[in-house]
Image (cartoon, rainbow, N blue to C red):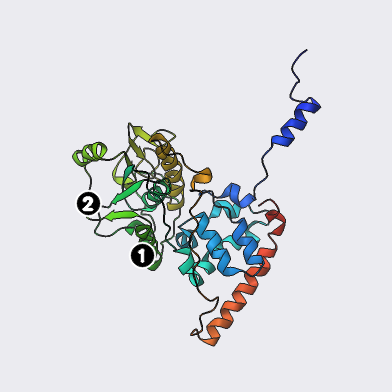
Amino acid sequence: MNAPEPHDSLFSDACEQKRPEPMPPCLRGSLLGINYGMPARLMAAGQEREAALALRKETPFGGILAALGDPGAQATCPKGSAHPFISRMLKHLSEHYGDMLFQPLSLPFSGKRAVVIGSGPAGLQAAWTLREQGCAVVVLEAASSAGVTLLHAPVQESSSAPAAPSPAVPAEIVERTLAMLSRSGIEFRCASPVGQAELHKLRSSFDLVFCACGKGAVLPADAEGRVEGNLFAAGTCVKNQKGMGALQSMAAARKAALAAGSAIGENAAPSGRPKDSTPSLAKEALFPKDAPAQELRFREEAEFSLRREAQQCLSCLQTV
């Protein structure tokens, strides 16, 4: 008896049973694979503090995303640009619930050691993704302080493709993000430039070397980010990737760091996050008692407006 053709009814029924649950359109479009569904559901219920914690579980870069936005997620929203809820939610939570967005995590160590060269958007994302997978991570930055690339919009180089738009991130957001990463077990060493001689030593000393040093290098990484051996790269240091913006660099770094972690024997949890990485709940009132009355009123009005916008997302959230 011949095997059933793809259009056979029994075959179709089996496919329907195995088909995974649908996902919100914003998750499909997010370059960093962020599910905004749960934060939006909590916002719709008036639980803003819990919404901030739900966003923190998705990414440690909520504050940075508040500045950069997530245009891919927004573009896939069925309501289009007339419903810029994600952008407004990110900015509101960053401004009023930063203590939760910048919660450090207590993550286990696997015994593997990784070094990340560069502390720009790609470097920070790579460092975090590797740390989530259990690596002890050291970030080497040539400048005197980390994260300086995020403080400025990208500079256009005449010899490269047009740079993707990337707004500058406020210094306070960068500082709080770096402090959170440090408290989560990532070590930053500034004023530490890396040349070819140092690169060779690093590859011998660490299980994994991840280059995210910006446009100063041209590395021929493959689709998984591997250059050769235990050397991986992502972002604008990769050949033909000079026009990447900050968000695109972070997405490429996340993908390459997941592949790199697997290559050195660390299996990433589904979606690249460990199973037991829930941030501790912050004991903070929704509205600080010492805040001026006018500020509280504006904040209440903003949250009421966001709540109504979030409720418009409920049809998509049935898939979350």
Taking depth in this image into account, of 193 and 83 the one nearest to the observer is 193
Residue 52 numbered mark, or none: none
- Residue furthest out toward the right: 9
- Residue furthest out toward the left: 197
Left or right of 76 on screen, residue 11 = right
Left or right of 193 on screen, residue 42 = right
Distance from Cα at disc 1 to Cα at disc 2 = 19 Å
Q: Is residue 149 visible to us here?
A: yes
Is residue 247 positioned above or below 308 on the image?
A: above
Graded by Cα atoms within 10 Å as few (under 14), some (14 to 19) or many (20 or more), the crowding at tag 1 reads some
* Residue 208 at x, y percent in the picture: 32, 39
* Residue corresponding to mark 1: 175
Name the quadrant of the N terminus. Answer: top right
Residue 64, by quadrant, is bottom left
User: Label 2 near label 1: C-beta < 8 Å?
Assistant: no
Name which residue type carries label 1: Glu
* Residue corresponding to mark 2: 192
Judged from the image, the secondary structure of the residue bearing numbered disc 1 is helix
Judged from the image, the secondary structure of the residue bearing numbered disc 2 is loop
Taking depth in this image into account, of 165 and 196 the one nearest to the observer is 196
- Residue furthest out toward the top: 1
Residue 197, by quadrant, is top left
- Mark 1 vs mark 2: which is more N-terminal? 1
Seen at 30% across and 50% down, the residue is 138
Taking depth in this image into account, of 223 and 130 the one nearest to the observer is 130
Name which residue type carries label 2: Ser
Left or right of 83 on screen, residue 209 = left
Is residue 263 positioned above or below 290 on the image?
A: above
* Residue 298 at x, y percent in the picture: 57, 80
